[in-house]
């Protein structure tokens, strides 16, 4: 019996034997070795003709073995309406199509087609075959790529687009974006557990079983619901022995769907780069929470408090620091204070003059007396005696003005932007809707990337040197001991020697006093001003001190000290002016700690085996694709190899893995059960990753208005021209994918 079917505007005749395109038509008596072979055959047939397939039913015998099953068109059957409101019915794809094949399973396991029905009661479309559910398949290699991309922090849309480009278009893919997103979501769920609290607990137990120096503390409420978390890996904990002298702490960053603030403890390593020394996730920003967090960090560091800490201007933080770190120097972030100027004075008639004078006082004051004098002149000149904000800042000037804090070591940091740069670094991995279980996975990726950056800097300092720019032996001395990035900073001071003039002033005992005059030039080459710096030098005590206090502040010898040493014909800098924290010739113990990543033994071993097999499989595949004969031979060999491999009992190979995870399982079972945190917004926090100042909000609002105004006409024209565009419809539908 033959029947005409409309296919994409053309007519095709379906007969009882085979179609014109060479695809075998199902026939009674066809024999197959297994059910899977029947499915593959019928699916290939359906894909060419343009319909989807589904398993319609099966029946088992008394012995539990399959005796009968059938495959048919996916439009088989009828859909009963489930919605009560008939005015909004859901779309239905069922047409009660009767096309199907019935198969009997014989005693030897072979499958024989006993009856067929080839007629369909609906249109067929080969071009749309890829959209049927049965044809959306993810093979093992594709799944592996998807998982690796997700672990690397690549966004879902970019990862999917990479497959589209590789396949040469959407039509060549064996899956769509919805299938892809569903698989990634399921992979995340299986990999991290069912709940955020459970996933977090499992991660911490797993990491502590890998390295006993992994440290974590979880603060819960009376209902065992997570409130605050602090943790640090073994490497970061060991790095505190070298770089915890100065830390920055910042909480203006949202990381997850619970609106918990990410609170990193950040230091500076021997390259002048940010290094993570601990992490916190906190639900509130009150003094009690900060006291808990700081005490957790202090316990982790075995009672070693930082010498100096930089934070934002927050009363709750200040209270906590006084209680937990009473001997630490507390400094407020200069940038956070200065960025408030527009909000405080933008409405003032002399705003620009106030801003210029205030910046000059803050950044260019050499002595505290000069700073205080100019501050009072500013207040009197612009009648700002009643300005509460300026008065409050002046009262705490010893906590934020550079001239008051430069006598302490801050590793060159003047703001908490080290913490903010760490936050920006995490932007590549997390966002404000990241769940806790996604965050702990992406934290591992961020940590790997940060360590890799430090390793690259170590190699650069080991493998190469920055050429000297003078014949001064002191420069060569620093070249041989300092890392490349720190040596560049010293060379900046060395270049400034040409603008310095040194004269001897007096001597008091063994101490010599010099006046170093530095000439500052304007943009056009004219002399802008001359600044005098007093330098004290004691050869007997090997002590030097400059009024600029760059060495005390940053740990780098300034141009003024260099000018005095050149005048005194000193060729070797005393050892106390070469800080160990900047040296490249010291082996630091934390750099040898490697087992800090969340890579289980089983996954690591499996990945290694796969990497060993991959080159051989690619080579064999290339050889087999040369001609049809080779392809036929290789296909037979691979099928036989697959059958033999599947017969191997895979359970025996996991005995070693189970032994290695025994400690982890015991600790997980013994640990306390937690519940996910409540989603509570922090007071005054906007729904975004970073707090914004008033001026930032105004600028953003103005930009948005101007962009909307300029694009209104173009947008209307685009809507008219794209009203019937298929690509527009596809784009809109892709935005509403549920996964």
Image (cartoon, rainbow, N blue to C red):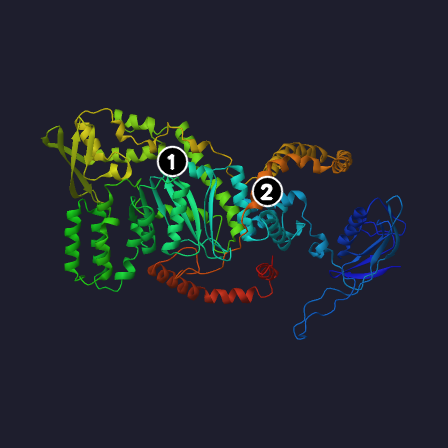
Q: Which of the two residues, 167 or 612, is positioned nearer the viewer here?
A: 612
Foreground pick, 406 / 501: 406
Which is more foreground, mark 2 or mark 1? 2
Can residue 153 be spotted in the picture? no
Look at mark 2 in the image and give the residue it sits on: 665
Q: Quadrant of the N terminus?
A: bottom right
Residue at 34% x, 42% y is: 305
Q: Position of residue 20 (x, y in %)?
A: 82, 51
Q: Residues within 10 Å of mark 2 (few under 14, many from 20)?
A: some
Which residue is painted at 54% across and 47% down in the image?
671
Instruction: Give me the C-alpha separation between circle 2 and circle 1.
Output: 31 Å
Is residue 650 shown left or right of residue 195? Answer: right
Apparent side of residue 456 relative to residue 408 in the rendered image (left or right): right
Q: Name the spot of residue 394 as percent of width and height, x first.
A: 21, 54
Is residue 280 visible to us here?
A: yes
Is the residue 433 above or below the residue 447 in the image? below
Q: Secondary structure at mark 2?
A: helix
- Left or right: 201 as drawn, with respect to 527: right
Q: Residue 124, percent across and down?
A: 76, 60
Which circle marks residue 241 in the picture? 1
The crowd level at tag 1 (other Cα within 10 Å; few <14, some 14-19, many 20+) is some
Residue at figure coordinates x 62%, y 49% from the top left: 190
Numbered circle sitting on residue 22: none
In percent of width and height, residue 332 lies at 29, 50
Tell me which corner region of the image, top left, top right, bottom left or bottom right, holds residue 660: top right
The quarter in which the C terminus is drawn is bottom right
Q: Nearer the viewer, residue 308 or 426?
A: 308
Dot 1: what SS?
helix
């Amino acid at each position: 019996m033959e029947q005409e079917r409309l296919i994409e505007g053309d007519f095709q005749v379906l007969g009882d034997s085979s179609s014109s395109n060479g695809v075998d038509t199902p026939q009674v008596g066809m024999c197959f070795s297994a059910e899977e072979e029947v499915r593959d055959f019928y699916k290939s047939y359906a894909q060419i003709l343009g319909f989807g397939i589904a398993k319609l039913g099966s029946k088992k015998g008394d012995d539990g073995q399959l005796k009968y099953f059938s495959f048919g068109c996916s439009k088989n059957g009828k859909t009963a309406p489930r919605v009560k409101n008939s005015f909004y019915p859901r779309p239905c794809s069922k047409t009660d199509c009767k096309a199907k094949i019935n198969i009997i399973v014989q005693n030897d396991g072979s499958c024989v087609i006993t009856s067929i029905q080839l007629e369909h009661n609906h249109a067929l479309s080969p071009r749309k075959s890829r959209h049927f559910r049965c044809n959306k398949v993810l093979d093992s290699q594709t799944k592996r790529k998807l998982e690796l991309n997700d672990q690397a922090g690549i966004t879902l849309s970019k990862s999917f687009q990479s497959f589209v480009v590789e396949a040469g278009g959407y039509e060549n893919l064996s899956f769509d974006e919805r299938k892809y997103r569903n698989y990634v979501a399921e992979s995340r769920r299986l990999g991290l557990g069912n709940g955020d609290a459970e996933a977090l607990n499992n991660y911490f137990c797993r990491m502590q079983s890998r390295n006993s120096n992994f440290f974590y503390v979880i603060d819960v409420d009376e209902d065992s619901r997570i409130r605050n978390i602090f943790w640090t890996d073994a490497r970061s904990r060991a790095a505190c022995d070298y770089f915890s002298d100065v830390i920055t702490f910042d909480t203006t960053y949202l990381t997850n769907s619970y609106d918990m603030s990410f609170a990193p403890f950040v230091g500076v390593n021997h390259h002048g780069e940010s290094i993570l020394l601990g992490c916190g996730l906190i639900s509130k920003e009150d003094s009690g929470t900060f006291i808990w967090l700081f005490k957790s960090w202090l316990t982790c560091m075995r009672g070693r408090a930082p010498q100096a800490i930089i934070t934002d201007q927050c009363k709750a933080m200040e209270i906590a620091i006084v209680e937990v770190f009473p001997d630490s120097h507390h400094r407020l972030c200069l940038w956070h204070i200065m960025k408030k100027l527009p909000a405080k004075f933008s409405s003032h008639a002399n705003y620009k003059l106030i801003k210029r004078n205030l910046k000059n006082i803050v950044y260019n004051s050499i002595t505290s007396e000069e700073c205080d004098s100019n501050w009072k002149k500013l207040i009197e000149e612009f009648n700002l005696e009643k300005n509460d904000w300026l008065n409050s800042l002046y009262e705490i000037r010893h906590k934020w003005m550079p001239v008051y804090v430069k006598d302490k070591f801050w590793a060159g940091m003047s703001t908490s932007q080290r913490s903010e740069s760490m936050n920006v670094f995490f932007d590549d991995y997390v966002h404000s809707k990241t769940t806790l279980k996604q965050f702990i996975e992406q934290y591992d990726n961020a940590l790997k990337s940060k360590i890799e950056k430090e390793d690259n800097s170590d190699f650069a300092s080991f493998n190469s040197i920055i050429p000297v720019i003078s014949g001064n032996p002191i420069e060569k001395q620093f070249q041989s001991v300092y890392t490349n990035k720190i040596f560049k900073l010293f060379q900046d001071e060395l270049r400034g020697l040409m603008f310095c003039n040194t004269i001897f002033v007096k001597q008091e005992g063994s101490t010599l006093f010099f006046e170093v005059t530095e000439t500052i030039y304007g943009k056009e080459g004219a002399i802008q001003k001359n600044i005098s710096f007093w330098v004290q030098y004691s050869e007997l005590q090997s002590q030097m001190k400059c009024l600029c206090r760059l060495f005390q502040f940053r740990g780098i010898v300034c141009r003024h000290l260099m000018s005095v040493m050149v005048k005194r014909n000193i060729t070797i800098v005393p050892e106390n002016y070469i800080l160990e924290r900047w040296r490249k010739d010291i082996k630091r113990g934390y750099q040898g700690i490697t087992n800090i990543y969340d890579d289980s033994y089983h996954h690591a071993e499996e990945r290694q085996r796969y990497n060993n097999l991959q080159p051989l499989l690619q080579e064999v595949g290339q050889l087999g694709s040369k001609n049809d004969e080779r392809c036929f031979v290789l296909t037979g060999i691979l099928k036989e190899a697959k059958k033999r491999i599947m017969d191997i009992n895979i359970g025996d190979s996991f005995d070693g893995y189970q032994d290695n995870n025994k400690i982890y399982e015991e600790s997980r079972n013994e640990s306390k059960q937690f519940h996910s945190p409540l989603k509570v917004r922090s007071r005054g926090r906007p729904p975004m990753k970073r707090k914004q100042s008033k001026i930032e909000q105004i600028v953003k609002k103005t930009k948005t208005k101007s962009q909307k105004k300029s694009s209104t006409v173009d947008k209307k024209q685009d809507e008219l021209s794209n009203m019937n565009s298929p690509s527009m419809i596809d784009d809109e539908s892709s935005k509403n994918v549920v996964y």
